[in-house]
């Protein structure tokens, strides 16, 4: 049975897609069977995995509206060695179309149940907003991975996200829990980064992942080549950190 995790944060530009793509590639290197679900209409995770989003015969949009199943829509990332349920701009229309559908919050959960046995991990890259798409991701998942930068505004947004997760847990998905907070784009030279990191450790304790993802140019360059940073430059500090994070995830799910 696959473990399903959302990579979510209501704040934009915090490295959600970078984390989702590189964690998928890192887990694949550890011989885990991985499906990456792109739930963002921008389709950045799709492109970052090396898949052309403009040439899709079927995408997560058709899957959520019941016009295609996951086995038809999924594609294989040759560079990342994992499968992708891709997205493009069509997905933006799904928000409106799903309003009138039955079980609108659990459409993704039902679709992923059909391929549950095919994977060890299913990672869902959520858009940076609390929308019907994000809600579908949270309802489908066993847990949430929250990537965040160690800066003041990140702390402000975190309480909103935690409250949202609590509401979904209470009303829609009793299995949902916070798996952990991942510190990303970390610059140890900044005093503020160290202070916020220490505050997080004090407040969240063992919910903070030990792995810290440093600010890294090679990770930022990788998507323009259609590759995860983990395979684009395996020797870079960013790639090494995501491989370590993959190993930490494998260990952490044993205790769930």
Image (cartoon, helix red, strand yellow):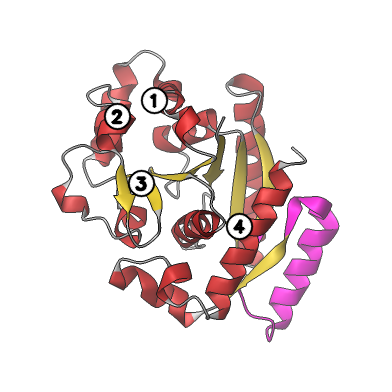
- Name the residue rendered at 40%, 74% in the picture: 232
Q: Residues within 10 Å of mark 1 (few under 14, many from 20)?
A: many
Badge number at residue 111:
1
Q: Is residue 17 above or below residue 213?
A: above
Tell me where the magenta segment starts and ends, as one range: 182-209
The outermost residue toward the bottom is 189
State which tag comes first along the sequence, 1 or 3.
Answer: 3
Residue in front for this viewpoint, 2 or 126: 2
- Asked whether the residues under the numbered discs 1 and 2 touch, taking CB atoms below 8 Å apart as contact, a structural biologist would say yes
Front-lying residue, 151 or 108? 108
Q: Is residue 124 placed above or below 166 in the rendered structure?
A: below
Question: Mark 2: few, some, or many residues within 10 Å (few <14, many ≥20)?
Answer: many
Quarter holding residue 182: bottom right
Is 4 on the left-hand or right-hand side of 69? Answer: right
In space, the residues marked 1 and 4 are separated at their CA atoms by: 25 Å
Residue corresponding to mark 2: 63
- Is the residue under label 3 in contact with that under label 1 (CB below 8 Å)? no
């Amino acid at each position: 049975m696959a473990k399903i995790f959302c990579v979510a944060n209501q704040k934009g530009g915090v490295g959600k897609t970078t984390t989702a793509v590189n964690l998928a590639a890192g887990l694949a290197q550890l011989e885990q069977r991985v499906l990456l679900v792109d739930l963002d209409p921008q389709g950045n995770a799709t492109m970052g995995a090396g898949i052309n989003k403009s040439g899709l015969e079927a995408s997560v949009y058709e899957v959520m509206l019941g016009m295609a199943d996951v086995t038809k829509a999924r594609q294989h990332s040759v560079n990342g060695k994992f499968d992708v349920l891709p997205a493009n701009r069509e997905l933006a229309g799904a928000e409106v179309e799903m309003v009138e559908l039955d079980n609108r919050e659990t459409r993704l959960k039902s679709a992923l149940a059909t391929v549950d046995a095919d994977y060890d991990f299913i990672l869902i890259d959520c858009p940076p907003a609390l929308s019907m798409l994000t809600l579908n991701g949270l309802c489908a998942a066993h847990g949430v991975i929250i990537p965040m930068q160690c800066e003041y505004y990140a702390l402000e947004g975190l309480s909103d996200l935690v409250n949202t997760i609590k509401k979904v847990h209470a009303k829609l998905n009793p299995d949902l829990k916070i798996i952990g907070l991942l510190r990303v784009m970390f610059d140890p030279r900044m005093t503020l980064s160290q202070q916020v990191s220490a505050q997080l450790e004090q407040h969240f304790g063992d919910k903070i992942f030990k792995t810290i993802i440093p600010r890294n140019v090679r990770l930022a360059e990788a998507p323009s080549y259609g590759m995860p940073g983990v395979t684009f430059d395996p020797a870079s500090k960013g790639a090494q950190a995501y491989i370590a994070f993959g190993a930490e995830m494998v260990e952490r799910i044993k205790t769930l």
